[in-house]
Image (cartoon, rainbow, N blue to C red):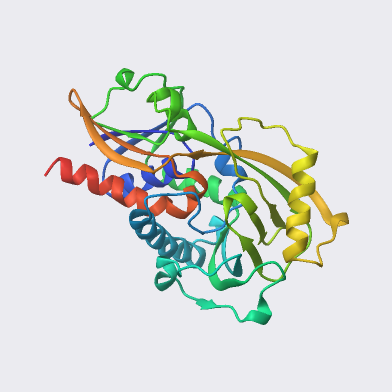
């Protein structure tokens, strides 16, 4: 089938690759490409965050975990490594459903939890270096025969195709008149220091993370809903550093090497569903919040399944 994918972020390119692998013809239309996308400044750690409904996102996340781990082993240019991290919580909670789908998970001993937190767990997950991963996704799409076009889509009705896969991210707010789509602003800091293992507090109100990549460590963060600003803020920088120092006292501010800002395309629930307009099947795949990478391959597989179900 002739398919058009709107958007060249991680969701769009993952969907394009799965469609090409399934034998479909694919064009990817986007106004911007890597390295100018929000996907490029993702931290990026596999970890379900700001994404619902849980019963679906846990499954999509587990499927993506398996694929990211495979890519890390078989595709060195993809920039994926496996690292350990520890999640700290301020109350005892039910253990996450995804714990059974990953390679390592254990509840922390009390002596492993920093002051101010009372519960937590250790886990192993993929770390994705987006400056490697995004070019790899784009090249993989081309290698499979996908066509990449720079084109701003303002109306789905203007596209001629049997199938449209809408991965427009935050652009869906205007493209689909979907006012549920809102930005969740994230500011991060890059530091030339390795914490040994990641440290996390993934509650939006106290969001803290130290993500150790091979080139640097990413410090965060912020989760400021409905905030469209891409300007770096001194106040956010100081808040991020103080939060990270609470979980990583050895942090050395003199080793900071950069900062960045991105807008997560948040929604009350991920929109992954199909609709028919005239003779065109439209698959919507957007609203992944802070879990675009984490859900990418599971959602891409579902895109292919929805197409197959519609034409059975």
Find residue 186 and report its horizontal and vertical position in percent. Answer: 63, 43
Position of the N terminus, as image quadrant, is top left
Above or below, 153 against 50 in this view is: above
Find residue 60 and report its horizontal and vertical position in percent. Answer: 37, 56
Position of the C terminus, as image quadrant, is top left
Q: Residue furthest right?
A: 254
Above or below, 38 against 217 in this view is: above
Q: Which residue is drawn at 59% across and 47% down?
A: 42
Q: Residue furthest front?
A: 91
Q: Which residue is drawn at 36% across and 50% down?
A: 53
The image quarter containing residue 287 is top left
Q: In terms of depth relative to the viewer, which is nearer, 190 or 56?
A: 56
Find residue 137 and report its horizontal and vertical position in percent. Answer: 48, 47
Q: In terms of depth relative to the viewer, which is nearer, 31 or 236?
A: 236
The image quarter containing residue 12 is top left
Q: Which residue is drawn at 31% across and 50% down?
A: 21
Q: Which residue is drawn at 39% across and 28% down?
A: 178
Can the viewer see residue 34?
Answer: no
Find residue 231 and report its horizontal and vertical position in percent. Answer: 72, 32
Above or below, 213 against 182 in this view is: below
Can the viewer see residue 4?
Answer: yes
Exactly how many numbered labels are in the figure? 0
Above or below, 285 against 51 in this view is: above
């Amino acid at each position: 089938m002739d398919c058009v994918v709107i958007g060249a972020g991680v969701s769009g390119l993952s969907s394009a690759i799965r469609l090409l692998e399934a034998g479909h013809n694919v064009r990817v239309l986007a106004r911007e490409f890597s390295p100018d996308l929000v996907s490029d400044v993702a931290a990026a750690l596999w970890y379900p965050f700001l994404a619902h409904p849980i019963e679906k996102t846990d499954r999509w996340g587990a499927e993506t975990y398996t694929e990211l781990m495979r890519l890390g082993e078989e595709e060195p240019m993809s920039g994926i490594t496996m690292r350990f991290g520890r999640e700290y919580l301020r109350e005892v909670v039910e253990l996450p459903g995804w714990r059974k789908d990953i390679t390592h998970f254990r509840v922390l001993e009390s002596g492993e939890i920093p002051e101010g937190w009372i519960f937590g767990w250790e886990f192993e997950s993929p770390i994705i270096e987006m400056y490697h991963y995004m070019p790899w996704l784009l090249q993989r799409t081309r290698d499979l025969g996908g066509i990449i076009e720079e084109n701003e889509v303002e109306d789905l009705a203007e596209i001629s195709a049997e199938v449209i896969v809408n991965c427009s991210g935050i652009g869906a707010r205007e493209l689909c008149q979907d006012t549920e789509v809102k930005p969740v602003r994230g500011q991060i800091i890059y530091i030339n220091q390795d914490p040994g293992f990641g440290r996390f507090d993934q509650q939006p109100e106290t969001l803290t993370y130290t993500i150790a990549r091979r080139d640097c460590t990413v410090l965060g963060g912020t989760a400021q809903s409905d905030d469209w600003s891409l300007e770096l803020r001194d106040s956010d920088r100081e808040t991020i550093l103080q939060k990270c120092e609470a979980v990583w006292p050895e942090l050395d501010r003199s080793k900071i090497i950069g900062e960045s800002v991105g807008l997560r395309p948040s929604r009350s629930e991920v929109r992954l569903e199909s609709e028919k307009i005239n003779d065109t099947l439209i698959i919507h795949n957007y609203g992944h919040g802070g879990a675009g990478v984490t859900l990418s391959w599971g959602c891409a597989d579902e895109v292919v399944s929805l197409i197959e179900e519609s034409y059975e």
